[in-house]
């Protein structure tokens, strides 16, 4: 069976994931280096009434879940390696785990932005941009061509029997 070639949507998805990773790594590192939030012009008073006394924990969460994780996914999105241990959390077994984890990333990003807006009771252009990036990743991941690319090809018994039958015909014809 012929391998599926990458479509323009796959390339856009990889680039978008890289953009998300860079932005979240920058934001996460900035918050970890300056937990007061001054570097990113986030006053500590925005955290009043939350469980956080500084931006350190949100910075770590941002760095790991929306920075490192999408960066990690770039390689498998391109090369589709078989890593059974990582495949354990794949709830969509008929798709490569990188596709499922990218779907998880889009959902995490959308939730992250929504929770930020709800907790901080403020919004910014950056939040709007990254919220749209989350929706864009979700749309790309669920697009038919991307789903088809990451769909795991399985060979049913019917396919194997049909191929064997075709081989038998070729062998029989050559005997003549």
Image (tube, rainbow, N blue to C red):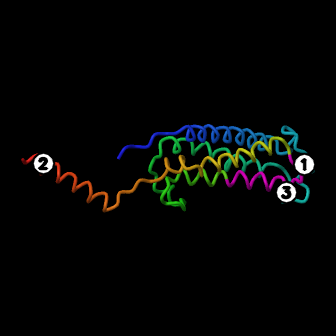
Which residue is at 90% across, 59% downward? 49
Asked whether the residues under the numbered discs 1 and 3 touch, taking CB atoms below 8 Å apart as contact, a structural biologist would say: no
Q: Nearer the viewer, residue 52 or 7?
A: 7
Q: In whole angstroms, how far apart are the C-alphas of marks 3 and 2?
A: 72 Å
* Mark 1 or 2, closer to the camera: 2
Q: Earlier in the sequence, mark 1 or mark 3?
A: 1
Tell me the number on the disc at residue 118: 3
The segment highlighted magenta reads 107-123
Residue under numbered circle 2: 173
Label 2: which secondary element:
helix
In this rendering, position of residue 130 left or right of residue 121: left
Q: Mark 1 = which residue?
A: 44
Q: Reply yes or no: does residue 111 show up in magenta.
A: yes
From the viewer's perspective, is residue 142 above or below residue 125? below
How far is mark 1 from mark 2, CA to CA?
81 Å
Magenta stretch holds residue 144: no
Magenta part, dominant SS: helix
Name the disc covering residue 79, or none: none
- SS for tag 1? helix
Residue at coordinates 17% horizontally, 54% vertically from top-left? 168
Q: Position of residue 121 (x, y in %)?
A: 89, 54
Closer to us: mark 1 or mark 3?
3
Q: Are marks 1 and 2 in contact (CB under 8 Å)?
A: no
* Residue 100, position as x, y percentages in the image: 56, 54
Q: Decide which of 52, 176 is in the foreground and name it.
A: 176
The answer to which image quadrant residue 14 occupies is top right
Secondary structure category for the residue under label 3: helix
Mark 1 or mark 2: whose residue is earlier in sequence: 1
Mark 3 crowd level (few <14, some 14–19, many ≥20, 10 Å Cα): few
């Amino acid at each position: 069976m012929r391998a599926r070639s990458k479509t323009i949507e796959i390339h856009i998805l990889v680039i978008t994931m890289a953009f998300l990773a860079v932005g979240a790594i920058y934001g996460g590192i900035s918050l970890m280096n300056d937990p007061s939030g001054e570097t990113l012009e986030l006053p500590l008073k925005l955290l009043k009434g939350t469980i956080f006394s500084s931006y350190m924990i949100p910075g770590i969460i941002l760095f790991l879940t929306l920075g490192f994780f999408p960066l990690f996914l770039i390689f498998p999105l391109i090369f589709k390696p078989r890593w059974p241990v990582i495949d354990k959390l794949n709830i969509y077994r008929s798709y490569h785990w990188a596709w499922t984890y990218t779907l998880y990333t889009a959902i995490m990003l959308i939730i992250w932005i929504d929770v930020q807006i709800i907790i901080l009771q403020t919004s910014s252009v950056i939040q709007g941009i990254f919220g749209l990036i989350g929706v864009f990743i979700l749309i790309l991941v669920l697009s038919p061509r991307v789903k088809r690319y990451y769909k795991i090809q399985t060979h049913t018994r019917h396919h194997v029997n049909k191929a064997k039958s075709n081989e038998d015909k070729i062998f029989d014809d050559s005997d003549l």
